[in-house]
Image (spheres, rainbow, N blue to C red):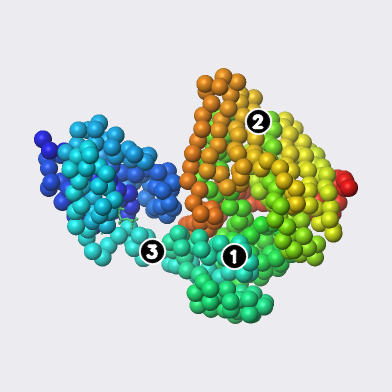
Amino acid sequence: MKKVITYGTYDLLHQGHINLLRRAKGLGDYLIVGVTTDKYDYERGKLNVRNNVVERIKAIEETGLADKIIIEEYVGQKIDDIQKYDVDIFAVGSDWEGEFDYLRDYCEVVYLPRTEGVSSTQLREESMPEVRLGIIGTGSIARRMVEESKYVSGISITAVFNPDIQEAIAFSQKYNIPQVFDNIEDFSNVISAAYVASPHPTHYPYTKYLLNRGIHVLNELPFSLKESEARDLFEIADSRNLVLMDAIKTAYCPAFKHMVSLIKSGLIGEVVDVEAAQSTLEQTPRKLDATQAGGGMSEDASFSLLPIMMLLGDNYTDIRFVSKMKDGVDIYTYCSLVYPTATASFKIGLGIKTEGDLVVSGTKGYLYVPAPWWKPSYFEARFEDISKNKKYFYAYEGEGLRYELQEFVTSIFYSKKHNVQLPHSLTISMARVQEDFHSGKNRVIID
Ligand code: CTP
């Protein structure tokens, strides 16, 4: 009996897939179809697959063409499967020509003709009205977002806004953005969603304006420096059924999401402490400008508050800050929080350098995320019995902004009201921490 194997995602099963399966089956007597898991697809950069693995397997089953269906969940699995199932032929569409020649050491490799004019990507795009994204602000984070947007489907960057029109023109020319504005009203007329990456004090007024114009907003951090403002923005978004997201990129990347799930599932027991640090010696003038709400806390506290609040919540009973200041901004801040059953602390430095890692301590073990933990691709669970230690690896592509952008687009598409990766209540609490700090509450200044 000649056994053939083929693999794919098979999202929104279409005629191209069916033709391919039929051709593959025609090469032998028994067809094995490998269907990728959701996690594997996400890790290899396919962020927008519509059907889950159960739905995709069911669709393959219903074609009646597969004699056996298996799931593909890791790099290198094809070789294992070929040996395990004693496969004679590996078949795949011609869009993969040459990619799988390395399997010739194990079996025959056949590239079958691909059906022209249909693909899952195309079907996903056709079924989804494209998000017309406008960008407010033309700084380095906005540049990185434009570059990352190429990896997210269902989005086109339509316009850029900057009150300094020359800046906006230079940005649009560099990134081929069709429309340029220095007038916010005109800008808001041509977009359906916006990424607000302007100077910190302008986040609130721009975001509020856009929401009131019916535009979904992805708001750069710090989301807001005042609790009442953050609350106000979410109230507007909720009342208008708009998506409003806090752009803490770490919250949306695979490693962080899984880390939170593992800890919440009890991997290290009850969490009793979270300790984070982040520092840089890169002191750009804007980061040190008090009039632009510069300083370590405004710049970076959102990152450290993310694991603290995701794991311990926001019902802390005490919060204290110790800061070193320069020209009215903090260049170093140590913050400690006391919870009813746990503690947390973080260190932030602009102009000091320290180990930027994250440690989550629990009653059964601890989780260690090495620097730069806010762009995680790896972490380790460690226990008293070191034979139980386990390392976890994940993809973290590019600047990591594609994950939050994909989440933003998906939330718009599915009209998602709740952000499970970062609940609105926590964003509001983070704004409260910012407000307490900037008002000098419980803050000690050291020389
Ligand atoms: N395939 C094909 N003809 C098409 C589309 C896919 O022959 N028009 C084949 C691929 O070459 C592969 C298998 O179907 O062998 C599964 O491909 P998959 O990546 O799941 O489908 P695509 O439609 O190409 O998906 P996407 O657009 O997400 O890449």
Which corner quadrant of the image does residue 128 belong to? bottom left
Categorize mark 3 by other alpha carbons within 10 Å: few (<14), some (14-19), many (20+). Answer: some
In front: 215, or 360?
A: 360
Report the disc number at residue 125.
3
Q: Please name which of the two marks, 1 or 3, marks the residue nearer to the observer.
A: 1
User: Disc 1, disc 2: CB below 8 Å?
Assistant: no
Q: Is residue 70 above or below residue 47?
A: above
Q: Which residue is mark 2?
A: 361
* Left or right of 24, for residue 149: right
Hey, which quadrant is residue 263 in on the image? top right
The residues tagged by marks 1 and 3 sit, at their Cα atoms, a distance apart of: 24 Å
Q: Secondary structure at mark 1?
A: helix
Amino acid type of disc 1? Ala
Q: Which tag, 2 or 3, sits closer to the chain's start?
A: 3
Spot occupied by residue 45 in the image (x, y as percentages of width and height) = 43, 51
Side of 182 relative to 128 (left or right)? right
Q: Marks 1/2: CA distance?
A: 35 Å
Image position of 146 with respect to 62: above or below: below
Going from N to C along the chain, the mark reached first, 1 or 3, is 3
Q: In the image, what residue occupies the spot 54% across and 53% down?
A: 400
Q: Amino acid at mark 3?
A: Glu
Q: Residue at x 29, y 34 (%)?
A: 80
Q: Quadrant of the N terminus?
A: top left
Residue at 42% x, 54% y is 48
Q: Position of residue 152 (x, y in %)?
A: 46, 60
Residue that badge 1 annotates: 142
